[in-house]
Image (spheres, helix red, strand yellow):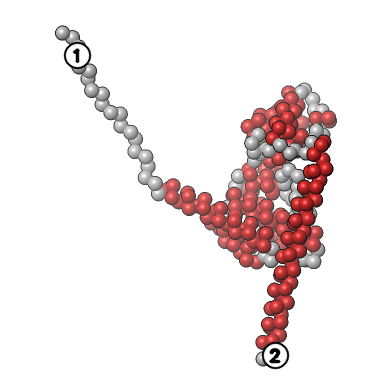
Amino acid sequence: MRALCLREQMGARSSWRRWCYDRTMRALTILTVFVFAFALEQTAGAGACLDAQEADEGMAMIEAFAKAKAKSEEAEYDYRWLCVRLDAMRLRPRIERACRAILDRDGLKSPCAAVAASAGVAQLGKHDLYAWATAQLDDPFTYGAAIGSTTIVMIGRMGDPRGLQALLDAWKAAIPRAAAREKNHRSMMGWSAWRQDAARAIGALGGKDEIAFLDEQAKATKDSFVAKACRDASATIAKRLANAAAASQLPPASPVSPQPTKPRASTAP
């Protein structure tokens, strides 16, 4: 009887710790969003990439920069590079044209590397942007709400199959590190945000095996945000596989035979 009571007490304490952890992560996330929104409000007068017009202006600046014979420090430090990164998917065709010329001239140290990678471009001419992104893969425990797009987000957008294994390896390698940092709230906040973005990227790239991994991680975590991101990514993969299976079962379209033309009636008398 005493052993039963002890087990119940331990279970109650575990549930209480889990509840406290979940509420702490929610509070930290809300605080991060508030600070980010406040920063945007304070910088709105100086330009803070709040609409598509600033992204279009930034894109025009980059296109002009691409035509220049040499790089310019003034252009490289223009804040509108960030505006283009935030709207990179919409501007992808223009980014590919302009950034190819810039990277050929200036190399991968140019801001155009991040801009093109944010647009989901894995290879731009001779420049391997996938390799550039994975060479500086974000650390899970210093990860934050970046202004723009992180390398994790870039890899998910690229659709390069090599990115899937890189993300899985990084996630699995970080799990024992996370256990050692469980009491460090800043590290745990980064670990939470990293896994949410990584789950979305895996959802874009993964297959049947990754569904099992994501479901396992959803069950293992105490973080409700991460669990939801994993379940959503798993559902995305399942839907994609179901659509592919349904498409493969459709009968091939039969070629349309040309209809024979009737000879015209003679109008001769």
Q: Nearer the viewer, residue 8 or 247?
A: 8
Q: Residue 266 shows which numbered tag?
A: 1
- Quadrant of the drawing holding the C terminus: top left
Closer to us: 174 or 246: 246
Q: Residue furthest bottom?
A: 1
The answer to whether residue 261 is above or below residue 13 is: above
Q: Position of residue 20 (x, y in %)?
A: 74, 68
Viewport quadrant of the N terminus: bottom right
Q: Quadrant of residue 51?
A: top right
Could you say which is closer to the camera, residue 74 or residue 28? Answer: 28
Q: Going 71% across and 54% down the picture, which residue do you hit? A: 194
Q: Is residue 215 visible in the rendered structure shown here?
A: yes
Q: Residue at x 73, y 77 (%)?
A: 13
Count of picture labels: 2
- Horizontal and vertical percent position of residue 251: 37, 45
**What is the x, y in percent for residue 252?**
37, 42
Q: Dot 2, crowdedness within 10 Å: few (<14), some or many (≥20)?
A: few
**Measured along the vertical axis of the image, is residue 140 above or below residue 72?**
below
Nearest the viewer among 104 and 33 is 33
Category of crowding for the residue at label 1, using alpha-carbon neighbours closer than 10 angstroms: few (below 14), some (14–19), many (at least 20): few
Q: Residue type at mark 2? A: Arg
Q: Secondary structure at mark 2?
A: helix
Asked whether residue 117 appears in the rendered view, the answer is no
141 sits to left or right of 226: right
- Residue at the spot of label 2: 2
How far apart are labels 2 and 1 at the CA level? 109 Å
Residue at coordinates 66% horizontally, 46% vertically from top-left?
155
**Where's residue 202, x and y in %?**
62, 52
Q: In the rendered structure, which disc, 2 or 1, sits on the residue that comes first in sequence?
A: 2
Label 1 is placed on what type of residue? Ser
